[in-house]
Image (spheres, helix red, strand yellow):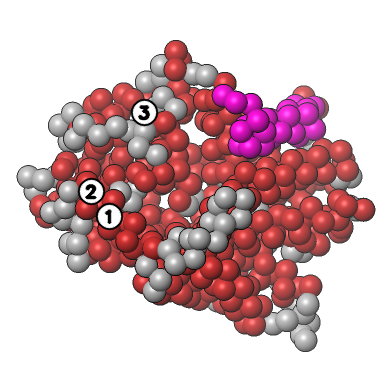
Amino acid sequence: MEQVTRGNFGSKLGAILAAAGSAIGLGNVWRFPYETGANGGGAFLVLYLCCVLIIGVPLMVAEFAVGRRSRTNGYRAFPTLGAKGAWKYVGFLCVLTGWLILCYYGVVQGWTIEYVVQAGMNGLAGKTPADYAADFTNFVSDPVKPLLYLFLSMGLTLGVILMGVQKGIERASKVLMPMLFVFIVVLVGCSVTLPGASDGIKFLLLPDFSKVTPATFLAAMGQAFFSLSIGMGCLCTYASYFPKEANLFGNALNIAGIDTMIAILSGLIIFPAAYAVGIEPGAGPSLVFITLPNVFYQAFGQWPWLAYAFSLMFYLLLAMAALTSAISLLEPPTLWIHEEFHIRRRYAAPIATAICVLVGIACSLSMGVWDGYKIGGMNLFDFFDFTTAKILLPLGGLLTALFVGWKMDKKALLSEISNERVLPQTLIRIYYALIRVVLPLAIIAIFLNELGLFGF
């Protein structure tokens, strides 16, 4: 055992980029485009932006307040702030949720590395749409190759975590986030200049509210909720490293702004290119791994070198986004093991990683040789995805909002969100109305919709 010492972010920029890296991941570059395509384009985007401001930012501030006030791991944060009875375990639920997500997220992260390799070796060129679908199916069902990429992806994530808060998480964020932004801007520039790209830009940016249904609104709320990494222990844990002078409202707005900008830019890569080659924008979850390679090589067929560069850069972008989120998902269980069991960080991180890898192996094999083993009619990969995304995440976010709004000491909360300054009473009343009433009702709506109980 050892005396626990805590790290802290060394700069305001590092704190913002690290937390933004937590939010920015496959949800922005993969989930947002296909959700937007399936829900009418621009109208969905408008609703999504509203949900980010009304739901995402206030709940992010709540998680930040809990994390910085407690200055401990996500599990102990709630008891430290006075949580009693079952409320003591809200933090553990969030940490566990993020941990479980990483078990299968690491598998998908490995897929992104495989596609970087394929793009780099020009293995995506000269194929038909049926070839792309068959290649993806054969790869994910292979009993060996995806596991090697799982080990590689988790090894990269572990390496960053082992270097600590400032030298690992903060330094990686300062490198990866600017690189991600540069890549995405270059890709947008290539995509929007394609012949016929203007239709894709209009689809994303010009709302047609005649396409809005109750299901559209609920899908926008769900995307905002999941995109910002709410309810999985990441934001609370990172906030425990924030300096006291950090402006929680300002950080939340900055992070939500960066996260939303990356999502919109991802749309500006995919929709103009898809429209340029006449492909349906609502292709669904297969968009990135099956549909997009076809889009790239059709769109830039006249310039093979540009198709090669475009596809390689896109999958590098996807892999970097996956890595920044994986880092944030591994940190909460690492900190929990480190602080609760007084195990050195150099051992706590490998323990947390080993558990993810073991479960990840089962998740990967469940898409191939273990496909016959079902839980509720789902293979293990789909079961983990369903349980975390549709049950545990909304539940963690709901309980966090209720705790901060109804249980946390009001003076302590105001001290954190105001940085000891006097806030306008109107702002305080609006925030409390959101965190106590509006957010819980919105999250319950998301929860019920994701379970299919509304029937929209």
Q: Are marks 2 and 1 in contact (CB under 8 Å)?
A: yes
Residue type at mark 3: give it. Answer: Leu
Residue 309 placement (x, y as % from top left): 19, 55
Tell me which corner region of the image, top left, top right, bottom left or bottom right, holds residue 429: top right
- Look at mark 2 in the image and give the residue it sits on: 130
Residue lying furthest bottom: 1
Amino acid, disc 2: Ala
Residue kind at label 1, given as amino acid type: Ala
- Residue found at x 33% / y 51%: 289
Badge 2 vs badge 3, beta-carbon distance below 8 Å = no
- The N terminus lies in which quarter of the figure? bottom right
**Depicted 142 relative to depicted 93: above or below:** below
Up the image or down, 385 lies above or below 449; here it is below
Of the two numbered discs 2 and 3 in the rendering, the one whose residue sits closer to the viewer: 2
What number is the disc on residue 242? Answer: none
Q: Nearer the viewer, residue 50 or 99?
A: 99
Q: Is 106 placed left or right of 445 in the picture?
A: left
Q: Is residue 415 visible?
A: yes
Say which element carries label 3: helix
Which residue has dot 3 on it? 204
Q: Which of marks 1 and 3 precedes in the sequence? A: 1
Q: CA distance from mark 2 to mark 3?
A: 27 Å
- Name the residue at 59% across, 66% down: 330
Range covered by the magenta-colored residues: 428-456
- Using the image as rendered, state which of residue 251 and residue 204 is in the foreground: 204
Please report the residue visible at 16 percent of the width from the left and 41 percent of the height from the top: 299
* Disc 1 element: helix
Question: Which residue has dot 1 on it?
Answer: 134
Among numbered discs 2 and 3, the one appearing first in the sequence: 2
Taking the magenta stretch, the answer to whether it contains residue 452 is yes
- Separation of disc 2 and disc 1 at Cα? 6 Å
